[in-house]
Image (tube, helix red, strand yellow):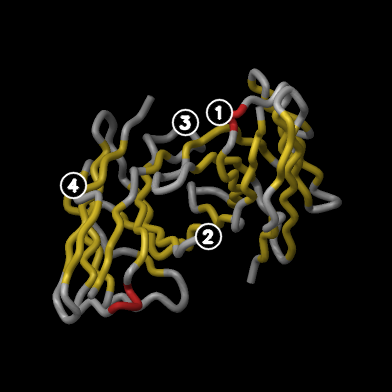
Amino acid sequence: SQKIEQNSEALNIQEGKTATLTCNYTNYSPAYLQWYRQDPGRGPVFLLLIRENEKEKRKERLKVTFDTTLKQSLFHITASQPADSATYLCALSRGFNKFYFGSGTKLNVKP
Amino acid sequence: GAVVSQHPSWVICKSGTSVKIECRSLDFQATTMFWYRQFPKQSLMLMATSNEGSKATYEQGVEKDKFLINHASLTLSTLTVTSAHPEDSSFYICSASPPLGTDTQYFGPGTRLTVL
């Protein structure tokens, strides 16, 4: 079965720095990869989607890369702010909106 | 943007009782909805795909007689946890996708179930 790995340790960074989160996967060939933000006790909120034929996607302070050879996606938040503190989940799919999620990485941005 | 609601937001029940959770797409029609469960500090685990007008498709290891799913309309799917036990205590989240043309799914706020 597919395995999706995100760093289980929290990422602590200083405000203003760039946060980089990693998502690695095995036994799977996704057509789509998404990143979500989840706050405690809440449902995930969609951030970005990238397709298998795309290398990079940007949205405001967010950037996602997708390397199908390395089976890895990187998620960057530039000029991070304390309000960016949350758990970030990656999710993979072959289509039809059926996604499988990683365990998430908690980001703490300190003022 | 598209909004998905869930009701109730939290529920406490006694062991052996059944609990129904509703998932509604408020401003769009969804032929497909998904149900997930999430344990503390763990990721979302896909339980089943709810299809309007047909039977749900369950993921491996999920008991369909335990978790009954009904998708009676294009805006409503329900998950019923039957004969609930303490190990069913979890955070249940649904998601829905707008019609063709988007690869995005929108999540509800989740329902916290505690079985005593």
Q: Are marks 2 and 1 on the same chain?
A: no
Q: Residue under circle 2?
A: B41
Residue at horizontal 41%, vertical 45%? Answer: A43
Residue at mark 4 to residue at mark 2: CA–CA distance: 33 Å
Residue at horizontal 27%, vertical 77%? Answer: B66
Q: Residue under circle 3?
A: B101
Q: Earlier in the sequence, mark 3 or mark 4?
A: 4
Q: Residue under circle 4?
A: B73
Front-most of residues A75 and B66: A75
> Identity of the amino acid at label 2?
Lys
Give the side of residue A23 with respect to residue A40, left or right. right
Q: Residue under circle 1?
A: A83
Residue at mark 3 to residue at mark 1: CA–CA distance: 31 Å
Q: Chain of mark 2?
A: B
Q: Are marks 4 and 2 on the same chain?
A: yes
Residue at mark 3 to residue at mark 4: CA–CA distance: 21 Å
> Is there CB contact under 8 Å for labels 4 and 1?
no
The location of residue A19, given as percent across then percent down, is 74, 34
Secondary element under disc 1, as helix, strand or loop, is helix
> Is there CB contact under 8 Å for labels 3 and 1?
no
Residue at horizontal 47%, vertical 62%? Answer: B40
Q: Earlier in the sequence, mark 2 or mark 3?
A: 2
Task: Point out the residue furthest to the right here.
Answer: A69
